Image (tube, rainbow, N blue to C red):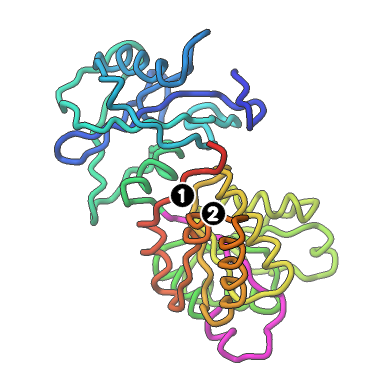
Amino acid sequence: MNSAAGTPNAIVVSAVAMRDDQGRLLTVRKRGTDNFIQPGGKPEAGETDHQAAVREVKEEIGLDLNPDKLRLVGIYTQDAANEAGCVIEAHLFEYTQPVNSYVQIAAEIEEMRWLDFSEGRTLPDDLAPLIRNVVLPMYGRRVVKTIAVYTGARLGTRPEFISLAVSLGKALADAGVTLVYGGGKAGLMGAVADACLDAGGSAIGVIPRDLVDRELAHESLTHLEVVHTMHERKARMVELADGFIALPGGAGTLDELMEAWTWQQLGIHSKPIALVDGEYWAPLMDMLHHMVEAGLVREADRDALLVIDDPVEVVSRFNYWTPPRPKWR
């Protein structure tokens, strides 16, 4: 296992996204594995990531890439598709010209598949996280099956906050998206969960033991995970979710939102984030504009945050969201 500079104990790989003249994405499955990945692999001693990409594609599918047509998209940390408990630091390249759809598999590749991800197509479940979370969004398509919602443990002073929470919970259920949230029964958190469950949806709660002991846990969830600390709670919610929503909330909501957004900027994840209720979040967006003007936040990172008023729009907006290029990479 190689060690990535920014991610200890990560497997460093060069991966190449290639499409044919119909726009289909080339994916491969290695012998003895279950999930489809992008062609590529680990650099050998003395190789650059660019050289590794060219060599691995030649070895795996017999294709001679023109090195001048390889564009580095970015470096992304994702769960490994076929090595349980591992992560990869993927140096993702795009091959900028169409490749012949008649290329043949070689080396350790058992199966090759051209993935049609055009609108309306159902995507298979056996795609690597790098494909689901980075490559498909790069081409305007992602798969959102779970969404983490950050919001207040109080109801607030405005009745529309409750209406918004109920509308979001129902919208997630109607879209077949599983709710991931903090596991509590109080406030807007509880309202989102109740609405999702009442509409026939699934809700996963992640809650620290201390809050369970205070009898604050929701008792009717699809699944409740009990963790030791607030830090574990936030990390687990990020791990479980394909995207994140911030409804009106207080300090805890801001804490969760800012951490998820910071991790997005660093490429720790490449998942969409939405602020739902533009009026409530307007002061925060004003502050972010101020940070951009001060040169302390990239414009692309500010613009990566979606501001949405209608909860029904969230899933479709998430499915076609494109991540920004990670900082420092």
| 163 part of magenta stretch | yes
50 vs 148: above or below: above
Front-lying residue, 63 or 48: 48
Q: Which residue is mark 1?
A: 324
Please name the amino acid that badge 2 sits on. Arg
Residue at left offset 38%, top offset 41%:
135
- In the figure, is residue 165 to the left or right of 141? right
**Does the residue at mark 1 contact the one at mark 2 (Cβ under 8 Å)?**
yes
Residue topped by disc 2: 298
Assess whether residue 159 is covered by the magenta stretch.
Answer: yes
Mark 2 packing: few (<14 Cα in 10 Å), some, or many (20+)?
some
Q: Separation of disc 1 and disc 2 at Cα?
A: 10 Å
Image-quadrant location for residue 317 = bottom left
Where disc 2 sits, the SS reads loop
Image quadrant holding the N terminus, namely top right
Q: Which residues are magenta?
A: 144-165
Residue, x 66% and y 75% (percent of image)? 249
What kind of element bears circle 1? loop
**How far across and how far down the image is residue 52, in percent?**
42, 16
Q: Position of residue 315 (x, y in %)?
A: 41, 64
Q: Earlier in the sequence, mark 1 or mark 2?
A: 2
Q: Which mark is residue 135?
A: none
Closest to the observer, 322 or 310: 322
Furthest residue toward front: 294
Q: 54 left or right of 184?
A: left
